[in-house]
Amino acid sequence: MEIIFGPVTSRRFGTSLGIDLSPTHKQCNFDCLYCELAPAATVTHQEQSPSVAQIVSALEAALAKHPHIDVITLTANGEPTLYPYLNELIDAVNTVKKRAQTLILTNSASLADKEIFQTLLKCDQVKLSLDAISPDIFQKIDRPHASIDILHIKDAVIEFSQHYQGKLFIEILFVHKLNDTPEEIALLNETLLHVNCERIDIGTIDRPPAYPVSGISYSELHAISQQFDSELPVHIASRLQAQACQSHYSTQAILNTLDKRPLTRGDIALLFDNATQQRLEALVKSKKVTEIERAGMHFFVPSENLERKRSKILTKPK
């Protein structure tokens, strides 16, 4: 029974040691279409779980071998918030983590439980999944346990974001012809305008899914990113199998694109042709475009955007 795995290097979270809170088999309150694990009946609690003492002992041994870890990631073959001793475990991990931060990857469903809500407030970083808002699309994609209501999840995510003091990330995974419609994106956008978070990661299927569904292309993800409000910190996270869709952009088109959605170097390599990339470098040298850091990642934005934000801060009434 392997409880600890890694270290794993992530573009989004740095170097991570993972803790599998369900190392024996899948135990989850969702049976998502896109899950890389085999299909399984949904559950509301774990039937088999390692003890807190087992986990902490394995973690301490791993940290002794790998002292330069950025995050300790609580995850599972399934949903980590179903672990019955989660509150006690997070307290214990926080006492032995040293320089590392605690991160939990959750499907958000358990946030409607007030005890879980309070427990997750203790983590340094939290990543919440939110694939759909409309009940019918939510049911089709995430295939939740019958007791779970997406409207309760939506309200809990918003409330959690207003109380949480750490780094909060939202993840949306798009599935072809399900949640990639303008109507569903509009519902997600409206919800996320009420969520305080570091970053919204949008992606698609990168691994063989449990069910016969397919992902969408990088160009489609980019088009979707443009449909979200420009104030939302949307980031295209899925690039493992991305195919370049390089196009020619004028100087003004580059500025307009970055104004709508900041891009990373990875985005730029996939989106801009060579001439456009050279044009972007000229904009950086002339200080019309600035590279900024957001939650550990670097993005290019028009310098005017930064000036507007500074002006808003300076003129904001106290």
Image (cartoon, rainbow, N blue to C red):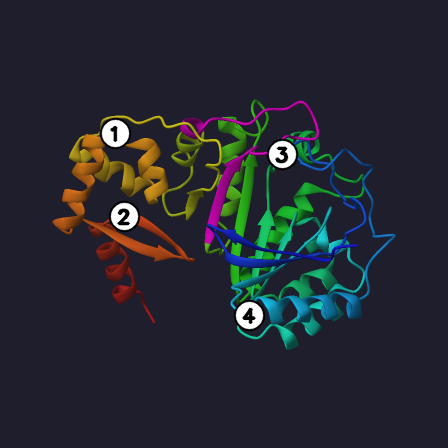
Q: Earlier in the sequence, mark 3 or mark 2?
A: 3
Q: Earlier in the sequence, mark 4 or mark 1?
A: 4
Q: Earlier in the sequence, mark 3 or mark 4?
A: 4
Q: Earlier in the sequence, mark 2 or mark 4?
A: 4
The reply, left or right, for residue 224 in relation to residue 263 is: right
State the SS at label 4: loop
- Tag 1 residue: 273
Q: Residues within 10 Å of mark 2 (few under 14, many from 20)?
A: many
| x 70%, y 73%: residue | 92
Looking at the picture, how far across and down is residue 308, in whole percent? 24, 55
Q: Is residue 213 magenta?
A: yes
| x 35%, y 33%: residue | 270
Nearest to the observer: residue 20 or residue 311: 20
Q: Is residue 11 magenta?
A: no
State the SS at label 1: loop
Q: Earlier in the sequence, mark 1 or mark 3?
A: 3
Rendering quarter of residue 234: top left
Mark 4 in CB contact with mark 1 (< 8 angstroms): no
State the SS at label 3: loop
Q: CA distance from mark 1 to mark 2?
A: 18 Å
Q: CA distance from mark 2 to mark 4?
A: 35 Å
Under mark 4, the amino acid is Pro
- Tag 2 residue: 301
- Tag 4 residue: 67
Q: Is residue 24 above or below residue 16?
A: above
Q: Is residue 30 above or below residue 113?
A: above
| Highlighted range, magenta | 199-220
Q: Residue furthest bottom?
A: 95
